[in-house]
Amino acid sequence: MVKQVAYGKLRDVLASLGYTPEDVENGAVIFRNPRRHLMIILRKLADDQLVRPIDMLSIRKTLVGDGVIEDDNDEFDSLFLIRKGDRLVWTDPKTRKESKVTAAAGESDGLVVVKQNGALVPCPVDQVRRIKRAAAAGRK
């Protein structure tokens, strides 16, 4: 299982799966998907705060139980980690220009090697975002 996930990253992943957050009283947030039956309830965190492992387990079980993902740790982990072959958008930190790239290797220690114009370039993972996968969106 993914060891550490920041709340901002979790929110982005859930949004890519069709879940929208709704703040509720007592500092909680409910993530709902109008095409699904189950909800995800978490305490609201700052984007850079880490989600507790028990909450990640609960989220995984909810996504499996509602048919969003298969009951497979690798599939759940792939929602958060960049893997070889993933299509990405890289944002140049100096110019803010975006370029489409492909991961030439999986994410490791906060870095991913990307292939850009035929060259292999190491890149911090916070400078890339994955292009939404069609497989996750196509599930019933």
Image: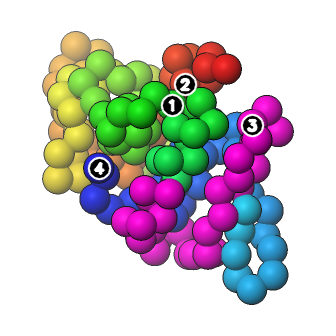
Instruction: Determine the residue located farthest toward the top in the rendered image.
Output: 118
Residue drawn at x 62%, y 17% is: 138
Report the span colored magenta: 31-58
The residue that label 3 is drawn on is 36
C-beta proximity under 8 Å, tags 2 and 1: yes
Please tell me how crowded label 1 is: few (under 14), some (14-19), or many (20+) other residues with Cα within 10 Å: many
The residue that label 2 is drawn on is 136
Residue drawn at x 46%, y 28% is: 70
At label 2, which amino acid type do we have?
A: Ala
Marking on residue 69: 1
At label 1, which amino acid type do we have?
A: Ile
C-beta proximity under 8 Å, tags 3 and 4: no
The residue that label 4 is drawn on is 1
Secondary-structure class at tag 3: loop
**Where on the picture, by quarter, is residue 78?**
top left
Q: Alpha carbon of mark 3 to alpha carbon of mark 4: how far?
A: 24 Å
Q: Is residue 53 magenta?
A: yes
Query: In the image shown, does 4 or 93 lie closer to the viewer?
Result: 4
Viewer-nearest of labels 2 and 4?
4
Q: Alpha carbon of mark 2 to alpha carbon of mark 3: how far?
A: 14 Å
Please tell me how crowded label 2 is: few (under 14), some (14-19), or many (20+) other residues with Cα within 10 Å: some
At label 4, which amino acid type do we have?
A: Met
Viewer-nearest of labels 2 and 3?
3
Nearest to N terminus: mark 2 or mark 1: 1
